[in-house]
């Protein structure tokens, strides 16, 4: 049995005249395709749940929107579904903007099947921005004078190179900086990281 939420009827009643017909029709299609659906309100808009979020709809001043929770996983050979801020159907201003009832019911049934099978949306991988650090010209110049040091330095992991550069650039006086550059060249030539003295043998 469907779980009807009176708040959705109230939401439709308060919507602009153009939207009432659209929302009422979409609501009917959802119930036809998924008789077991449960209605609710989330984030101030009508939602339809079946073994998890299924789809939702909303009305704005000049357009309505309808979206599937798993749009990306719904078969769509004709490219009718969109994936943007306007939901899965773009801006809906009249029933003419929607695919045929047969196609819509097919989409809803496909979304229902995904939830029945427990298919989950792929977890979006967080893009980790690698912060590049600049190697001062005077360090590059010093390294180029010692081919072995340069080759070893370039072969070091980024973290090792960064530690050396930070150590050198933190020097407040030029004399201190030059001493650290000389020490770096010596250690790098021997294949040592800046923390080599603290590493377990």
Image: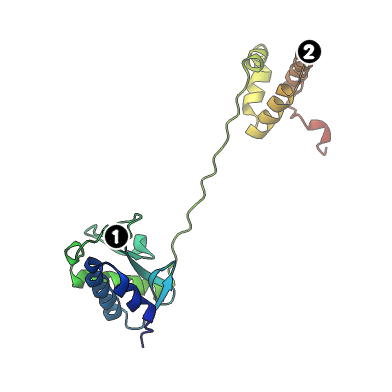
Determine which of the numbered discs, if any, sits on residue 112 in the image: none
Tag 2 residue: 175
Closer to the camera in the image, 69 or 120: 69
Contact (Cβ within 8 Å) of mark 1 with mark 2: no
Which corner quadrant holds the C terminus?
Answer: top right
Closer to the camera in the image, 157 or 39: 39
Q: Is residue 27 above or below residue 95?
A: below
Q: Residue at x 30, y 80 (%)?
A: 31
Residue 136, located in which quarter of the rendered image? top right
Describe residue 51's horizontal placement relative to residue 126 as left or right. Answer: left
Residue 36 drawn at (x, y percent) = 36, 83
Which residue occupies the extreme bottom position in the image?
A: 1
Q: Earlier in the sequence, mark 1 or mark 2?
A: 1
Describe residue 9's horizontal placement relative to residue 191 as left or right. Answer: left
Q: Residue at x 62, y 25 (%)?
A: 154
Residue 80 drawn at (x, y percent) = 24, 59
Tag 1 residue: 61
Disc 1 from disc 2: Cα separation = 69 Å
Residue 166, located in which quarter of the rendered image? top right
Residue 117 in sight here: no
| Secondary structure beneath label 2 | helix
Q: Is residue 3 above or below residue 155?
A: below
Residue 129 in sight here: yes
Q: Residue at x 19, y 67 (%)?
A: 95
Nearer the camera: disc 1 or disc 2: 1
């Amino acid at each position: 049995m469907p779980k009807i939420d009176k708040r959705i009827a109230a939401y439709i009643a308060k919507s602009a005249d153009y939207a009432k017909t659209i929302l009422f029709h979409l609501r009917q299609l959802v119930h036809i395709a998924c008789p077991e659906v449960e209605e609710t309100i989330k984030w101030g808009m009508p939602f339809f749940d079946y073994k998890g979020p299924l789809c939702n709809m909303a009305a704005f001043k000049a357009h309505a929107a309808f979206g599937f929770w798993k749009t990306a996983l719904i078969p769509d050979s004709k490219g009718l579904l969109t994936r943007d801020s306007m939901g899965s159907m773009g801006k809906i201003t009249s029933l003419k903007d929607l695919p045929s009832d047969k196609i819509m019911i097919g989409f809803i049934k496909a979304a229902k099947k995904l939830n029945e099978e427990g298919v989950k949306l792929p977890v979006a991988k967080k893009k980790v921005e690698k912060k590049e650090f600049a190697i001062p010209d005077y360090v590059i110049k010093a390294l180029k004078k010692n081919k072995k040091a340069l080759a070893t330095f370039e072969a070091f992991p980024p973290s090792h190179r960064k530690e050396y550069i930070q150590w050198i650039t933190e020097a407040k006086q030029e004399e201190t900086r030059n001493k650290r550059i000389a020490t770096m060249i010596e250690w790098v030539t021997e294949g040592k990281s800046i923390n080599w003295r603290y590493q377990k043998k």
